[in-house]
Image (tube, rainbow, N blue to C red):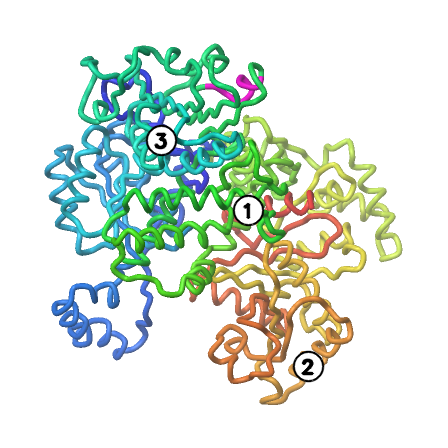
Amino acid sequence: MHSTSAKLHKKAFREDQTHMPDKEKNERQGPSVSPQEALDFHSMGRPGKLEITPTKPMATQRDLSLAYSPGVAVPVQAIAEDPSRAFDYTTRGNLVAVISNGTAILGLGNLGALASKPVMEGKAVLFKRFADVDSIDLEVDTEDADAFVNCVKLLGPSFGGINLEDIKAPECFIIEQQLRELMDIPVFHDDQHGTAIIAIAGLINALHLTGRDMQSTRLVCNGAGAAGIACIELVKSLGFRPENVILCDTKGVVHKGRTEGMNQWKSAHAVETDRRTLADALDGADVFFGLSAKGALTPAMVKSMAKNPIIFAMANPDPEITPEEVAEIRTDAIMATGRSDYPNQVNNVLGFPYIFRGALDVRATTINDAMKVAAAQALADLARQDVPDDVAAAYQGNRPKYGPNYIIPVPFDPRLISAIPVAVAQAAMDSGVARKPILDLDKYTNELSARRDPIASTLQRIYDRVRRQPKRVVFAEGEEEQVMRAAVSYANQKLGTAILLGREEQIKDTARNAGVDLSKPGIEIINARLSRRNGIYADYLYERLQRKGYLFRDCQRLINNDRNHFAATMVALGDADAMVTGVTRNYSTALDDVRRVIDARPGHRVIGASVVLARGRTVIVADTAVHDMPDAHQIADIAEEAANFARRMGYEPRIAMLAYSTFGHPPGERSERVQEAVKILDKRRVDFEYDGEMAADVALNPRLMQQYPFCRLSGPANVLVMPAFHSASISTKMLQELGGSTVIGPLLVGLNKPVQIVSLNAKDSDIVNMAAIAAYSAGA
């Protein structure tokens, strides 16, 4: 499930279905994907999106004895004596259940509990990705509210929190209310409250920018579904006067005395008014909240609103009115939508992971209004802060500034994890629902920052940047099935044009047999032998290689017959922006091909850098691809290039120059080279932390590093410079296969033109990532 994607607005009441076809859940908004792509994504490797891995070693008989019998009896007895100890000895304190009966899936309706499982798994992935909250999905096969409540209640001891999802109204109201009364852990129906919290955050800032006071501001909410009612309940708790908040549904204004289409949830917000239609309600109104359908808000209605109107058109995929339509009528409006392609996206992923993070960390018994308001206020405050350099990259290459087009942070702002949970935890403590108060909030803030998944944020920044500046990427091995799939994915994600290099008939035959649709816009096929650019390419290559033993006919043969040389020349001469290859050839062979065509950037050294993500910790390893046995000067150069790369990826480098020895013990020739490299960097007066030589465990383990108080590193290293290519390659591959780490790379760093080489037989997803990274480098 795509991390930025948006859920369609689910119908909250059967009688309102014609007016509310979309739910503004907003976790799913993003580039379109083909059905086959989606099925392939969910089926590749292990089916689904989740797995369970142990957090304790299970290597010896003693480990097993501690984990199970007889050792497990000790925490069992401790919990029996004091149930709160379950948070100390089990996963309960960091475990949330995502629970649904499938009666209102995404916008697809009632497709049953089992059909909802992919969505619930996706929700669990978002919990982990954004806030390091472990989550398990549970699909309950009943539409009976009482049976559902009883099931969840009995499962309560397993979890620290309950996230209800995709349950149709009015049952969703009943279920949440009863479970909150019955359980002593947070129960949160995100369909109701998630959108409300993010919308209120934007509203707080919009009111501030327009100089409005909550007591006198008139708000109209169109859409009396789960999210709509949650929104008006929260604005009232924020300080809005009830008589100034009007709720509308398909039958008009929800007013006192109305009987048609009413129920207890609507009746609670009925007002004394003579206004009967949405148009009547909006005449002179300050704020419009739309949780309804495309076209519900007309230009005439917008024109009738007060000066500096605040318009939150949150229906998805199409808002009630677009920003372009509003701009044609008036220039003084502040707008928000549920879409990622407009400013001020109301996106639920800004809320629920961090709200649960804060609630779990203080062992809250519930998520109350004070905690919701605190989350909204923290979001609002974050949007008002200056964006520092290390965060600006998260905003698609632009540095946002608080104002009408920036009242809500974006989902991949890395500061969210250290801002929202702290506010929620503080509100829980202040309101008396925290069972484990946090005494040092500054320390807690730092711990939260360490939980962030930085490489995922980095990749998202890369994808966002490329979508803003699409690039032409040539896929050199275009006749391979996984390369075709990668090219289709690249085009579908609106990253630019994918150029498949190969014989057209062969490519089309393979695609047809594999079920790959190459007919979509953004895909080109080029046959190197038949290209009109062959002569120009051969001349260019001959000019480069004529003094290296190559005849002109040799260069012609390379251009006509070797796709790597043809693709690299395309990039060198500007016919493509970037290149990706490597599926059918060894890395070193592909690199030799590319280096015949493209040089290093002036003043730079070409290296291979691999990004390793292991249990939420990111480390860059260099050189993993180019230098076999570097001397001291080369090691120093590699360190500088790796530091530059780390900064481009969003990290402040702390470089450990590794060897089998640590600070002189035991001595050895390779260690001496590393020691000399440190002295060379000293003379160069570089502006990053570095030290060596040291063993890998010392570089990564702060407890071991403390044994060397003279070490220059301020903390565990995040860049490891290896003493040789073989040690770098062996270690990263072992981490990937035995340690379950994610390894991205080796990435080619230092070339004058963007080229990336994937590993032999790479999967289509790996090829797309490399293509996006290459395209990103083309725009740098």
Name the residue located 28 percent from the left edge and 55 percent from the top edge: 95
Labels 2 and 1: the sequence-earlier one:
1
Q: Is residue 225 left or right of residue 572?
A: left
Mark carried by residue 342: none
Q: Amino acid at mark 2?
A: Gln
Magenta stretch, main secondary structure class: helix
User: Which amino acid lies under the numbered mark 3 shown in the image of this protein?
Assistant: Phe
Please state the horizontal and vertical placement of residue 371, each as a whole percent of the image.
Answer: 33, 46
Find disc 2 in the rendering and name its residue: 675
Distance between the alpha carbons at the discs numbered 2 and 3:
67 Å
Q: Say whether disc 1 or disc 3 marks the residue closer to the N-terminus.
A: 3
* Discs 2, 3 touching: Cβ within 8 Å: no
Mark 2 vs 1: CB contact within 8 A? no
Q: Which of the two discs, 1 and 3, sits closer to the camera?
A: 3
Q: CA distance from mark 2 to mark 1?
A: 43 Å
Write down the region rendered in magenta. 321-327
The residue at 22%/33% (across/down) is 112
Residue identified by numbered label 3: 240
Give the mark nearer the N terminus: 2 vs 3: 3
Q: Which residue is mark 1?
A: 385
162 shown above or below 472: below
Q: Amino acid at mark 1?
A: Gln
Is residue 124 positioned above or below 587 on the image?
A: above
Local SS, label 3: loop
Could you say whether the residue bearing mark 2 is in a helix, strand or loop? helix
